[in-house]
Image (cartoon, helix red, strand yellow):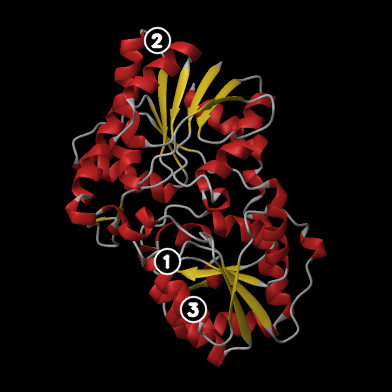
Amino acid sequence: MRVLYLLNVSNSSQLTADSGFTFADMLAPALADAGVEVTVASPVPAGDARVNFAPTISPSTKYRARFDPGMDALVTLIRDRRPEVVVANQIEAAPAIRAALLEARVDARIAGYCHYLPFSFTDTGDLELDPALNDRGLGHSVLLAFAAGLAACDRILVHSSTAASWTAAAAARTGVDLGDKLHIVPAPRDVRLVRDPADITPPEGRVTGIYNHRLYRHYGTARFTQLARRLVADAPVRLTVMDLFGIRSPERIRLDPSPERHLEELATTDGVTIASDRGDRIRYRSLLAGTHFGIAPFRPGCPWSMSVIDCQAMGLPVIGPRTGWLAEHIDNELLFDTDEQAVHIVERLAADAEFYLVHARRAHASTTELAPVTVAARYLEAIK
């Protein structure tokens, strides 16, 4: 099977903050192991030497990634590689890919992977647009472009049951019949961030937590900041907050300056340390290994989180709000609805060694089916 994997990397200078790139970097070699001829079209290479690389230009903004697929380049690339399957990691680009296949006279299936949903659903079934993609009211247009992409795909892959439910509901509301196209294929865990639970020791009365998510406003960073202040004041805890972006471009800051504002606020909070892995996964592993638990993002539309999986694969219990995929994936004893409940959970992790070790083992076990070879098998089955 010849697979052309169209990878959208929106910020090639900060690859460790790009879950789609990490996904491809783990998955492409596993697909090659299974005998697939893989070409990754991306601004930067992903995978090992057996994975073919076709350089592309990184979109300068999140809206260009969705509305400017680059038809001329697509047609040229498809004619050159003549794939049997095209993987669209930007669902909104699928109609352009279909048109490019027609122009290039190449008969290939389109498999769309929904890495990011531009919407979510409330507990009462109301559809909410993602505020991160709703500048100047563009959110509805993005939703319709996403629906058009679903319609153009032959296969649609999502991370989780929550993502599948939301995607199916959004398709129904926009008049798109998914038929039997929808498949759940979770992302692979990073093999560099896996620790044997036997090597984990419980804390001794004081714990360090880590928050390793993007500091955008729509990730619920203000809500996390509120909890962080409560934890460092009322519980035996210190917190490490990851600066995943470093210095962003003026264009990205202009679209959304919230990460810089939140970072500045957190940096002045007693008991909170700002850290960076400087793009080094070994340093990132060391930072994770130096903590005792993780905190999930407060993003309402969370269909999956690479950073949560990173912590769990390292045997770190992750506490999180009872919402979206988090409520599906995180152990019920570590979910909370209020700050008081979160403080109580952290205090128990700090003081109850058996409770801590049980959840460290459960965290690690929740990622065992995410080994790249296992995910690659599910991926191939889904795109056939």
Asked whether 159 or 355 is in front, the reply is 159
Within 10 Å of disc 1 (Cα), the crowding (few <14, some 14-19, many 20+) is: many
Question: Which of the 4 image quarters holds residue 272?
Answer: bottom right
- Residue that carries the numbered disc 3 in the rendered image: 266
**What number is the disc on residue 376?**
none
Residue 19, position as x, y percentages in the image: 52, 48
> Nearest the camera: 197 or 207?
207
Residue 341 vs 114, above or below: the answer is below
Residue 97 in the image: above or below residue 343: above
Point out the image quarter for the N terminus: top right
Instruction: Please tell me which of labels 1 and 3 falls first in the chain.
Output: 1
For the view shown, which residue lies furthest in the top direction? 105
State the residue position of label 2: 106
Disc 1 vs disc 3: Cβ atoms closer than 8 Å?
no
The quadrant holding residue 275 is: bottom right
Q: Is residue 122 left or right of residue 89?
A: left
Residue type, label 2: Val
For the point 54% across and 65% down, which residue is it?
Answer: 243
